Image: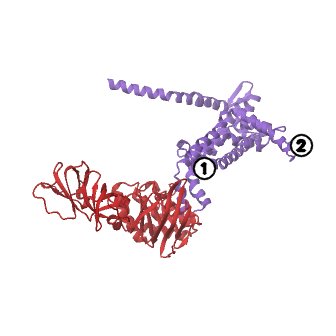
Chain colours: A purple, B red
Amino acid sequence: MAGMVQKDIKRLSLYLLFAPFALWIALLIVLPHLGMFYISLREKVGPRVYEFGFENYTNFFLEPIYWNTLLRTGSMSLLVTALALVLGFPIAYYIAKIAGNRTRGALFLMCLIPLWVSDLIRAFGWILLLRETGVVSSSLQWAGMIDTPIEFLYNDAAVIMGLVYTVILFMIVPLVSTLDGMDKSMIEAGYNLGGNGPTVLRRIIIPYAMPGIVAGCIVVFMLTAGSYLTPILLGGKNSSWFTEQIYDQFITRYNWESGAAFGFLLLAFTSFVVWAGLKLSGQTLNSTVANN
Amino acid sequence: MQSNSENDLECIGVKRHFGSVRAVDDVSLEIPKGSFFSILGPSGCGKTTLMRMIAGFESPDAGDIRIKGKSVIDTPPNRRNVKMVFQHLALFPMMNVYENIAYGLRCNGVSKSEIETKVRDVLERIALPDVANREITQLSGGQKQRIAIARCMVLDPDVLLLDEPLGALDLKLREAMKIELKLLQHQFDTTFVYITHDQSEALVMSDNVAIMNEGKFVQTGTPQELYHDPSAAFVAGFVGDTNRWDGKVKSVAKGVAEIETATGLTMRSSVRGERTPGVGDAVSVFVRPEFITTQKAGGAAPAIGKNKNVLEGRIDSILFNGANSRVLVRDGSEELVEADVVLTGGTADLRAQDAVRLIWSAEQTMCFAS
């Protein structure tokens, strides 16, 4: 009898522990997505008259501007991911393998500090620097290197730079934790057996860090492809980011059906890229994201 | 010192300081071709720093390191033909056994077909011909050990450095690997430099052993020399088990000193070490447990020679360990003395609380001026 009660209590506490997570998933993720998916499958045939069909999806493929925007967003996100990796790897390597114990904490903190300020404020910070009357332009003028003010904002370079800046931390953290687990003697063994610097990097350090690299790339790519604020503020109207297109459909055109379909297309597209990335690198979700 | 090309490895006056710590202080060594050389010392004595300098991961502040007679001070680690087996082996977990062994050959630009022959060859020599396609995690401790050695030996090094590679193994495997390492060294006929703090590893495997303490080589010699003829108190205390007393010299004659220990015992001991102590000097006295004979007390006292030491006491406890059994005897001054005994399992065996007489000769007692 007492044993039964014990067992029930155990089960109840298990349910209670699991409940917030289950509610979160069900109410905030699954339910809205089901609703959106339902909306995306409605075709508008007249005012307030709908039919079930795939027209919203076929529209996307028939109108080049839509899928061009998606491809552009995808390729620029890949570029941002690659840049974040190239810039983040040396930083992560320095933090994990070269810095002493005390400097490590300080360096990690310095990486975190930008996160304490909201995305919006940081984007405006970039605007302050890059606009025609901004810090960069006026200092160049003051130094005599240019005659007239230059607008550094509202181009792809500004968007990419801003995005790399926003997401690089999410690349550094998984890289540091993977590289941390690497015995220093493994690198020494790489040299001892005759490898030079590039060989050791290519054959030992990078393969070892692969789970961290893939995890960081997945997170960074997802964040970038789904970001809205930075591309809009730094790229202006020309940024042609796909999230902007979705926003347009929902808000400006009040075409929820098409916006919902675009949302699902973005989800499918990014999922496909992540899947392809995992396949190409020979990693699995378990060995990368779940590992950290 | 004249460079001798018969030596695979020479260190000449090598020094390395970290701040005010002298990790390696003026160490010189010569290792002849094809021998098994061990550097034995307590942790923190500088042996790992010395090995890292030979491998090229640290550079000495002063002195020269020569491999086959050529100075390698300016050679980066990847160009030195000195390979190293790391303490935790440092096998590459993302590569399988074949890739691990082939790594060094690839770095040297060896052709694919030659790599295949060499890897198969070396796996055969370490008696693991079938593991080429295994992952590192699928190997047992002893197998990993052998793969780590094979990975180095396939490159045909002039010197193989081993940094306490048996430390992580359990006792049984460690005993087996000791013998196996010695056999592998014979088979490959390469100079092995083995670093350890475990004296039995050093004594069993080595042709020559250097005892290192506080950055210096205290004594270098064959295991037997170190054991039976230590040149310093540190060596006598560090190599092998021993009983130790501190005392003062009462008289010295013909290399034998009469000593009164701090606890009031009097014993005769042969004088060892570089410096002969004078009357009244402080000395440390050592005698190994296997040189002490234990007799049951009572009955007629046997005739005892002039150069024998005798100590009466009571057995405090018996440390039974088969053929290596030992008794702890508490003497009149309440000190414990260890002595080896043979326990046959019969009724005549010594038992705890038995009164006993310990006898040992002055020749097998060593004292060093301290």
- Density class for disc 1 (Cα within 10 Å; few <14, some 14-19, many ≥20) is some
Picture coordinates of residue B122, whole percent (x, y)? 45, 68
For image coordinates 89% across by 43% down, the residue present is: A148
**Mark 1 vs mark 2, CA separation in Å:** 42 Å
| Quarter-of-image position of residue A50 | top right
> Does residue A151 appear anywhere in the picture?
no
Judging depth in this view, the residue of A189 and A254 nearest the camera is A189
Picture coordinates of residue A59, whole percent (x, y)? 73, 38
Q: Earlier in the sequence, mark 1 or mark 2?
A: 1
Picture coordinates of residue A239, whole percent (x, y)? 77, 39
* Badge 1 element: helix
Give the amino acid at mark 1: Tyr
* Badge 2 element: loop
> Does residue A127 appear anywhere in the picture?
yes
Q: Please tell me whether residue B356 is drawn above or below residue A28 in the rendered image.
A: below
**What residue is pinned by disc 2?**
A148
Q: Are marks 1 and 2 in contact (CB under 8 Å)?
A: no
Judging depth in this view, the residue of A180 and B72 nearest the camera is B72
Give the amino acid at mark 2: Thr
Marks 1 and 2 share the same chain:
yes
Judging depth in this view, the residue of B75 and B17 nearest the camera is B17
Picture coordinates of residue A13, whole percent (x, y)? 44, 26
Judging depth in this view, the residue of A36 and B8 nearest the camera is B8
Name of the residue lying farthest toward the right? A147
Residue A93: which disc? 1
Q: Is residue A191 left or right of residue B264?
A: right
Q: Is residue B100 left or right of residue A42?
A: left
For image coordinates 47% across by 66% down, the residue present is: B160
